[in-house]
Image: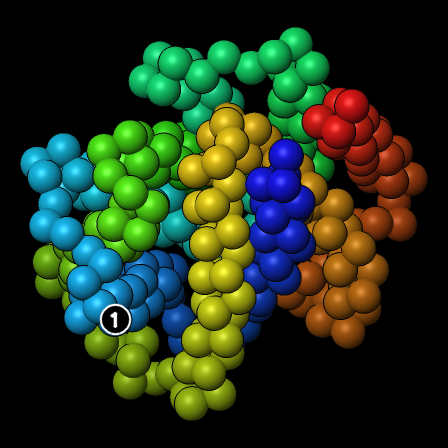
Amino acid sequence: MAWIYLVLFAQFLNALVVLVDKYIITAKTSIKPITYAFFVSLLSIPVIVLVPFGLISLPTFNILSLSLFIGLSYVFSILFLYKGLTKTDASDVVPVMGSLAAITSFVFGAFLLNEKLSEDFVIAFTLLVLGTGLMSYFRFNRKVLFYSIASGVLFGLSSVFIKLIFFETYFLNGFFWSRMGNVFGALLLICWPSNLKTVMSGIRQSNSGTRWLVLGNKFLAGIAFLLIFVGIKLGDVSLVNALNGAQFVFIILFAFIFSKKFPDYFYEDVHHKETVLQKILALKFIIIGLAFLFL
């Protein structure tokens, strides 16, 4: 059960990352979602340092295929997420994305991974997903709804593919080649001339402060992802994604801290009566769900 604590800490970090992501792509940083998705994916390339130590082996066809699936599903998942964040608040998009990721990984995990949750885990999963979904204010149009659904489904699939790659090889090798899949996905994005033009324009217009903010935020995201990666290796992929609900507990706490100082980027309607009641109900579902995991 130690993997649950790792994933919970990862979700604490992810809550910070999501808020900073929202700031970066909605503030006056000149970074478009396509540019941000490209660099976030490309930042997986430092894992190349593992090669000289003899820790990595050549991929089989299955490993290579899974790595490509992981990379493509992850890259387009975050691209749709960032597109959604430009249109509405993180509190609207991310909960829907998180709940759909959990449902997707549960369905495909049952078919592809033969995962079978115990009765307590099924109850915990259901409560966590319900709580996560209720965290959204649902203030979006059809386009943002599409972005949220597409992001959630693709992210859930990427998690299942990550679990599958561990059936094919050892941890470090699977970690390395899945990150190389992200790099491939990033390079695929700029195969379209219009995307390449947007990325190059973003590079020229961004200042050093923005670049350091992106790097620092993605460093935190990298730590969170590694912890989640370990959680997927050790636990049930559907439950790992269901624990996304904990992220929104932290986001609400951060909302009280940041909403007054940065209302244009982190505003949460935390003082509206109906919103507070909805959040309390969502928190109850999440807390009870977490309690079932530790019974």
Please rate how many residues cluster around mark 1, counting C-alpha atoms within 10 Å: few if below 14, some from 14 to 19, many from 20: few
Confirm whether residue 69 shows in the render: no
Helix, strand or loop at mark 1: helix
Amino acid under disc 1: Val
Picture colour scheme: rainbow
The residue positioned farthest toward the front in the image shown: 54
Residue at image position (51%, 70%) is: 217
Q: Residue at x 73, y 52 (%)?
A: 250
Q: Position of residue 102 (x, y in %)?
A: 52, 28
Query: Relative to 44, does residue 205 appear above or below in the rendering?
Result: below
Q: Nearer the viewer, residue 50 or 72?
A: 50
Q: How many marks?
A: 1
User: As drawn, is 241 to the left or to the right of 233?
Assistant: right
Relative placement, left or right, of 128 versus 258 is left
Please indicate, yes or no, whether residue 294 appears anywhere in the rendered image.
yes
The answer to whether residue 221 is above or below residue 151 is below
**Residue 280 % position (x, y):** 86, 35
Outermost residue to the bottom? 208
Q: Residue 47, how many percent across, how many down?
A: 29, 65
Which x, y percent locates residue 19?
61, 61
Between 107 and 63, the one lying in front of the other is 63
Identify the residue position indicated by label 1 in the image.
49
Residue furthest top in the image: 119
Q: Which residue sits at x=47%, y=45%?
A: 230
